[in-house]
Amino acid sequence: MAYFRKRDNGWEYRISYKTPDGKYKQKSKSGFRTKALATAAAIEMERQLTQTVSIDTNISFIDYLKNWANTFKKRNLAKGTWRNYEQTFRIVEQHFGQTKLTAITTSTYQQFLNTLGKHYYHGTIRVIHHRLRSCVKYALADQLIPYNFTDLAIITADKKAKPLDEKFLELDEYQRLLQHLKENITSHRYIQLYLIAVTGLRVSESLGLTWADIDLENGIITINKTWDIYDQSGFMPTKNPQSMRMIPIDETTSQLLRDYKNNRWQTNDLDRVFLEPNQVWLNRVIKKIVGRNVHVHSLRHTYTSYLISQGVELITISKVIGHKDLTVTLQTYAHLLEDKKEKDFHTIRQLFQ
């Protein structure tokens, strides 16, 4: 039963209720501009207090994690990302076994992260922690635990990640790669690698292309799907809604694609532009040309860094490469943006001289 009264700072509601152990307690809140607003809030609070949810309070951490991920995450994840979640399941189960969710404390969770720190890179541990932290927030909302035991966690790692610079090609390497590919395009693999290098496409996106997605006259590629590179089961949704985008291509690239379609393209029922997802082969081609091991995905980073160095607006870059939002672009390429900041400062100073 809710009671209402007018106070100096507005209307207040006060609710008396009985807890599961038979004790009576009260909840109150004030500051509502009108009694109607206070009444609406009180009704919602009463609903929450009387709502009963059937949840196994003896559930293990790993079982709750799997249930949470299947309920709230799986439906919206790409297959490759879900495989990463399954790897997280294995890591958690290996460490905690069937330990009850309610038995895990801040200390035991920190010990888990410390153990990971002996075997994984800092970035990998951060991703695992982020997933578990999100899961535990739901456990807290389900009133299964009294506090979020991940809140005070500290991530450390003995293994040192590769410097960010190693994830990029140097400008001369990038130009040498493009020139070599242009002069030696004798197969679909070469044109696929060249297209990835001048568009920042993910490999799965390049394999999801059909000719209907490529406007050779206007120099636009539309990304609206990907290809399942794990099970070869067919077309898949893009990584996220922002990955659905348009990418400009120059006339040279358009002409290379025309020549490829007319002379070397293998026709197929789905009208796919490229058919073979052999990333190992693509990596070998890059190594042969630039002389060091560079993963094909590094071409996406190199393309982005090149656009930044050439002064392309960040909001445009973020949209062209399909980042979820501008924050992702800023965080990923912060070291390059520092150089750009100095140039921009110089430009600003010149404006007022």
Image (spheres, helix red, strand yellow):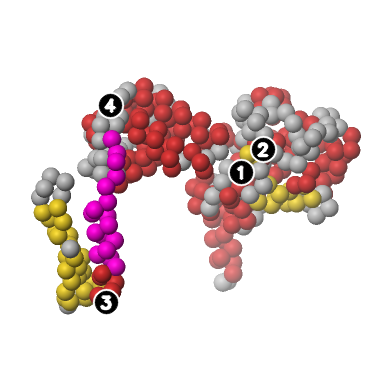
In the image, the segment drawn in magenta is 40-56
Q: In this rendering, does residue 70 appear at all?
A: yes
Residue 312: image location, x then y, percent: 64, 55
Q: Residues within 10 Å of mark 3 (few under 14, many from 20)?
A: few
Q: Which of label 3 and label 4 is nearer to you?
A: 3
Horizontally, residue 1 falls left or right of residue 162, namely left
- Can you say which quadrant of the picture contains the C terminus? bottom right
The type of residue carrying mark 3 is Thr
- In this rendering, the answer to whether 60 lies above or below 258 is above
Q: Residues within 10 Å of mark 1 (few under 14, many from 20)?
A: many
Q: In the image, is residue 238 part of the stretch drawn in magenta?
A: no
- In this rendering, the answer to whether 293 lies above or below 20 is above
The type of residue carrying mark 1 is Thr
Q: CA distance from mark 1 to mark 3?
A: 47 Å
Of mark 1 and mark 3, the one earlier in the sequence is: 3
In the rendered image, which residue does mark 3 sit on? 34
**Of residues 67 and 162, which is closer to you in this image?**
67
Residue 319: image location, x then y, percent: 61, 53
The type of residue carrying mark 4 is Thr
Q: Secondary structure at mark 2?
A: strand
Q: CA distance from mark 4 to mark 1?
A: 36 Å
- In this rendering, the answer to whether 255 lies above or below 115 is below
Q: Secondary structure at mark 3?
A: loop
In the rendered image, which residue does mark 4 sit on? 99
**Of residues 340 and 19, which is closer to you in this image?**
19
Of mark 3 and mark 2, the one earlier in the sequence is: 3
Q: Secondary structure at mark 1?
A: loop
Q: Residue at x 70, y 36 (%)?
A: 207
Of mark 4 and mark 1, the one earlier in the sequence is: 4
In the rendered image, which residue does mark 2 sit on? 235
Q: Residue at x 27, y 51 (%)?
A: 51
